[in-house]
Image: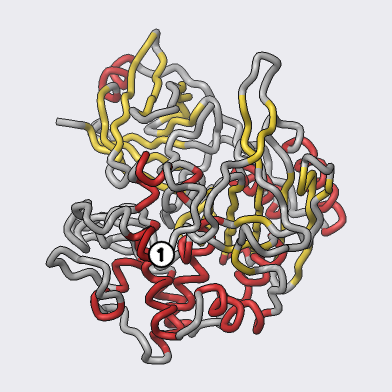
Amino acid sequence: MAPLVLAVAATAFVSFVPSSHASTTPVHAERAPTAPTSEKLEAEVDALVARFLKRPGAAGLSVAIAKGDELVLAKGYGLADAEFDAPADADTCFRIGSVTKQFTATLVMKFVEEKKLGLDDDLSKHCPEFPLQGKKVTIRQLLNHTSGIPSYTDIGEAWEKVWPLELSHAELLALVKDKPFDFEPGTSWAYNNTGYYLLGMVLEKLSGATYDELVRKELAKPLGLERTRRDSNVDLIKNRAQGYGVESTPMGPRLVNDQVYGTNQPGAAGMLLSTAKELVTWQRALTSGRVVSKESFAQMTTPTVLPDGKNTDYGFGLMIGDFEGHRRISHGGGIFGFNSILAWYPDDALHVAVISNGEALRSEDVEAELVWIALGLPRPTPKDLAIPADKLSKLAGVYTIGLLNMQADVTAEGGKLFLKARAPGQEKFRLLYQGESEFRAEFDPKVKVLFSSDGASFRLFQGGGQFEAKRDA
């Protein structure tokens, strides 16, 4: 079953939408075990990953877990290259997609601290070649996805036709520079790869260095991140994983090589390679104040609130959310052949990174299981209660999921409730009643839906994200 709210395709350098810091209502569960020892944790993780790698479309994984000041696990699993049966190890580097954005946001904040850049500077001050059509777009709006500039990864065929090409800045921006804005800057929110690409250009102009050089000099080298660098179709990069998609055949699903693409195209929105171990090392440094000031990091992790009061649950290159009541700061990425997740649980002093080089194996699913293991959390055991007839009729209807601008149908059939998003690839799934206003998805009990008492709205919790939906008039 496809996930309900895949905001953009995996090829758009991100694999899911922002998350929320609001606590969630716990589902009925078994008694929580204690957190395992390091030896037991490694054994449990090994067994868990072995099960995931048996799934169709799986290739390899890079996994790392840190608790407090201790790196308790950093390993590669499965295959880095399926054609050569080359195994992945802890130093195999993978594409991290939009996890790159927190590196970009951090560089911006370092420049702000050094007074080289202002968050409320107009983009035209630094990139006058990009036409703003009479509007003012600030650096802050690029960071928090409220600029309204069209995202080049969302324009369909015009971008797809040039996937294999190494585009210059001018050639890539030409894809969107004459298109109308999606909304007035600052008034709404839409995940935007063009915005972060432009931030990379701003950094390059202010420094006189390429984005890759900045990452290496300002971030990777000081922190000892030897495997973190830009992707390239030209450079020889030792121990680099190949990415894979999956294709349906009459004999069943089979691995296929990922889409060829120009590695310049993601830019500061998603061009980096890394390992799970180095992502955890990076995150521990960032969250401890060793990269930017505590004040800068606080801005990066403060959710943006729109003029209408809507909380976007997105800061600067980071998503603010929770997992089964545990606060979570994270970001994921999805790019041709790969997907990734890097998450920090501040109240639990836990850092988890997972990177997959198989598009069909979602790193987010692996990460959730790892958190249950590392924290000794109970697995959700959803109930399946009978739904009162008056509640069925009250909840059925058409809703709009605001930040996603997506409609969803809630239908009552044979005394059961179902939900289906009106988007390509989405399937109808059953909602299991937990009592009061809570439902869980039958296909994945981690997915939760809370309806308001009057049936006028619901909140969807998935992958650490919270999405509000309102009944259509």
Query: Which part of the image, by quadrant, shows the N terminus?
Result: top right
- Res. 303 in view: no
Task: Name the element at disc 1.
Answer: helix
Residue 23: give x, y in percent of width and height: 45, 52
Residue 300: give x, y in percent of width and height: 42, 71
Vertical comparison of 27 with 63: above or below:
above
The residue wearing badge 1 is 197
Numbered disc total: 1
Residue 254: give x, y in percent of width and height: 69, 27
Classify residue 393 as left or right of residue 328: left
* Residue lying at 56% horizontally and 73% vertically, measured from the top left: 212
Classify residue 161 as left or right of residue 10: left
- Res. 416 in view: yes
* Residue lying at 48% horizontally and 63% vertically, measured from the top left: 267
Q: Quadrant of residue 366?
A: top right
Residue 327: give x, y in percent of width and height: 51, 59
Q: Quadrant of residue 408?
A: top left
* Residue lying at 48% horizontally and 51% vertically, measured from the top left: 14
* Residue lying at 60% horizontally and 32% vertically, measured from the top left: 381
Classify residue 63 as left or right of residue 120: right
Task: Tell me which amino acid carries mark 1.
Answer: Tyr
From the viewer's side, name the closer residue of 472 and 316.
316
